[in-house]
Image (tube, coloured by chain):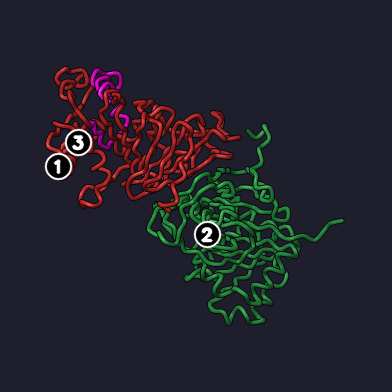
Chain colours: A green, B red
Amino acid sequence: MTQRRRGDLLVIGGSEKKDSDEERAILRQAARKALEEDGGRIVVLTVASMEPEPLAEIYQKAFGRLGVRQMEVLDIRNREQAYEPANVEKLAGASVLFFTGGDQLRITSQMGGSPLLERIFALHEEGAAIVGTSAGAAAMSETMLIGGPTNRSCLSTLAMAPGLGLLKGVIVDSHFTERGRFARLMGAVAQNPHNLGIGIDEDTAVLVSENDEELTVLGSGAVYVIDGRGIRFTSLSERHPERILTVHDARVHVLGRGDRYNLKERRPIVPSLERV
Amino acid sequence: MTQRRRGDLLVIGGSEKKDSDEERAILRQAARKALEEDGGRIVVLTVASMEPEPLAEIYQKAFGRLGVRQMEVLDIRNREQAYEPANVEKLAGASVLFFTGGDQLRITSQMGGSPLLERIFALHEEGAAIVGTSAGAAAMSETMLIGGPTNRSCLSTLAMAPGLGLLKGVIVDSHFTERGRFARLMGAVAQNPHNLGIGIDEDTAVLVSENDEELTVLGSGAVYVIDGRGIRFTSLSERHPERILTVHDARVHVLGRGDRYNLKERRPIVPSLERV
């Protein structure tokens, strides 16, 4: 008996390779469900971007080269469009919903609470894969980072906002090592160590499957997991926003391609010796 | 009864502020012993730099503004000079030995095993402070990082070399957040988790005193301590140098100005509540 189950989440750190065939592992994974299903379709959502047309074209070409035959671009420019039944209907039967990069606040501010987003959540519950890259990845958190220092250490305050909440108890950051974001993700975790920080390099992704219990790393870079539950001290205080944020006893894992992490138990899975 | 004891070590992450009076906390600490002692002298060692003259001038001016009256610049260009008795004699009575930035391999390759370096160690044992910034900081480790990715994740192999060994069991990295070096320091620690990784931001320093037992953070940035003793798995293997380095269960502390860390017990010291 096969059980209907929630679809995969694929969270991409941005700048995934689109050209060379052997390097396109991440986009191939993104397209997988559309390729496997009879009449499978990808809907590309460019809501985050201020230049949606060229971006849509890049993805249409890339998915086309991978053999995807049915694609739809849904470009939401304002909240009204997220309420239009015609737009909601464009999602019907989608196997994959792909959120491009851009500005993550555009995703949540244009679509948050709308019938369009409700339909996306419903499709996900029924098995559709949701994919986000860069801003599309950041928006998957319950609380998302929307700013913060690049290659600078972290002060006590960080720009954050409510995200889509597809990944519970997790804060995602993208372009992670390339933009020197370790300090800001550590700061975000320290604000509420209940959350797990997941920093994803460019051309790197985490695939969340098994009903959100496990993630697997894909691509050429690394994924950094910051587990704050053991934090014994932080200096966070609204009274001293100008101070460097002190954090004691964060736990950090670095994961590469093929590595897995159990989100429920919050433990990295030790690879079998054959891999090593 | 005062006991003669080893001098302080001041390890600076590079680009310490030299101009504005109130911002010069790090250089003031560097000069402290020369200012306190009767006839106190600073010797500036430019061996790491390929442009020693302008660099020497910058520090002579900066220390002069702080009130240091006796300064000597010792520029070692080759190993012969590190054996010349006249150069060794220039160190006599120095209160502070200041290693500038440049290339850390120049410090160790020109001075390693020389009478000049022996004298520096002896002066340190007798109470002279040793200060190093940037390359001068990196050289203080027993094993020093000499290369590695900037804003890229770390593969299994890293360029390292034997350092001066003034700080035992520690690997120092400088320009830490500014140059996106978290990944490489984590990689260096994973190569031998016996070592503690200390990543120091620009305009930030750690003062090691109390006979090397404790460090205190100075300056405007953060210090990252990577404690690898708890690492339960790494993927390190000479057979797969092209792979992302997997690391499970590193412990990370982030420290700001005034924060302290006990190097012997390998524990951050929780600040008293008054500070918070």
Residue located at (67% from left, 32% from top): A273
Q: Which residue is mark 3?
A: B36
Return the residue nearer the eye: B37 or B177: B37
Q: Is residue B73 visible?
A: yes
SS at mark 2 in the image:
loop
Q: Which residue is mark 1?
A: B67
Q: Chain of mark 1?
A: B
Q: Is A178 inside the magenta-drawn segment?
A: no
Return the residue nearer the eye: A164 or A51: A164
Residue A267, above or below A160: above
Residue located at (67% from left, 63% from top): A96
| Image location of residue B261, percent across then percent down | 43, 39
Amino acid tagged 2: Ser
- What whole-number distance in Å separates the C-alpha atoms at marks 2 and 1? 52 Å
Q: Which residue is mark 2?
A: A134
Q: Chain of mark 3?
A: B
Q: Is residue A14 visible?
A: no
Amino acid tagged 3: Glu
- What whole-number distance in Å separates the C-alpha atoms at marks 2 and 3? 54 Å
Question: Which portion, as a residue range, is magenta?
Answer: B96-124
